[in-house]
Image: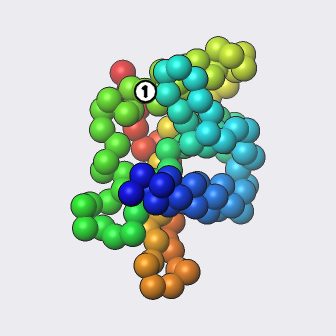
Amino acid sequence: MHKFNKYVGNFGENLAENYLKKCGYIILDRNFKCKIGEIDIIALDKDYITFIEVKSRYSLYYGHPCECIKYNKIKKIYKTAQFYILKKKLFKNKFRFDVIEIILNKNTDNYSINLIKNAFQIN
């Protein structure tokens, strides 16, 4: 099951990257990893650097994909983003956290993409 989930995740991230490029985003990094965690996609959207979590599913049986991003995951993404900002010296930029939900169809090649801008903030 783990390999299948990884395959679905990678497939969804590829779809998300192509979608973002069509929307005018410039991809800065993909699957950025450090000791703290991982960020699926980091991209530039006009004057915002966006840290994007991609969630892909085959159904809404367990709810919308974004609903599985709990507080602990948000904290990890935020801390990883802080590390990225320090490492790349991006202090003067504006930042945002987005989520891309992808619903895949088991029977066809069809899928739907939902981009949620400014999906979460941490105080």
Residue 26 against residue 19 in the figure, above or below: above
90 lies left or right of 75 = right
Q: Secondary structure at mark 1?
A: helix
30 lies left or right of 78 = right
Q: Where is residue 47 drawn, in percent x and y?
A: 69, 37
Going 53% across and 33% down the picture, which residue do you hit?
A: 38
Q: Which residue is mark 1?
A: 76
Farthest left residue in view: 62
Identify the image quadrant of residue 1.
bottom left
Going 30% across and 50% down the picture, which residue do you hit?
A: 67
- Type of amino acid at the residue the image marks with label 1: Lys
Q: Is residue 19 visible?
A: yes
Q: Where is residue 123 drawn, in percent x and y?
A: 36, 21
Identify the image quadrant of residue 82.
top right
For the residue pair 25 and 73, the one nearer the viewer reads as: 73
Residue 81 against residue 86 in the figure, above or below: below
Going 66% across and 41% down the picture, which residue do you hit?
A: 30
39 lies left or right of 71 = right
Q: Where is residue 10 drawn, in percent x and y?
A: 57, 55
Residue 55 against residue 33 in the figure, above or below: below
Q: Where is residue 85 drawn, in percent x and y?
A: 64, 20
